[in-house]
């Protein structure tokens, strides 16, 4: 079952993106490099509740 998750910037703590992931296959928190409009650069975004 795929669930909607929110991605938050590690630098400015702004919640920028939403995506889906399969929680049965990937139980740990997702981490990707994305562009943050507030920081104006590519930063690490981590999954939040």
Image (cartoon, rainbow, N blue to C red):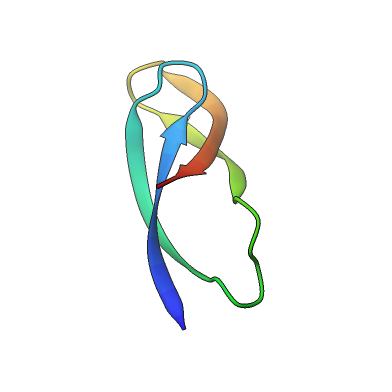
* Quadrant of the image occupied by residue 40: top left
> Where does residue 46 sit, x and y in percent of width and height?
54, 39
Q: In the depicted view, which residue is nearer to us: 25 or 41?
A: 25
Name the spot of residue 39 as percent of width and height, x first.
Answer: 41, 16
The relative height of residue 40 versus residue 43 in the rendered view (above or below) is above
| Lateral position of residue 12 relative to residue 45, left or right | left
Front residue of 6/24: it is 24
Q: Residue sitting at 46 percent across and 83 percent down?
A: 1
Number of numbered discs overlaid on the protein picture: 0
Which x, y percent locates residue 15?
33, 35
Please give the name of the residue rendered at 54% of the width and 27% of the height, measured from the top-left corner: 42
Q: Is residue 46 toward the left or the right of residue 25 in the image?
A: left
Residue lying at the far bottom of the rendered structure: 1
In the displayed structure, 1 sits above or below 34; it is below
Which residue is depicted at the point 65% across and 56% down? 28
Identify the image quadrant of residue 32.
top right
At 49% from the left edge and 21% from the top edge, which residue is drawn? Answer: 41
- Image coordinates of residue 33 in percent, x first then y, are 59, 38
* 24 shown above or below 20: below
């Amino acid at each position: 079952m795929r669930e909607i998750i929110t991605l938050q910037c590690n630098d400015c703590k702004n919640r920028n993106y939403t995506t889906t992931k399969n929680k049965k296959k990937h139980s740990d928190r997702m981490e990707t490099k994305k562009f943050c409009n507030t920081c104006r650069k590519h930063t690490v975004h981590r999954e939040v509740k």
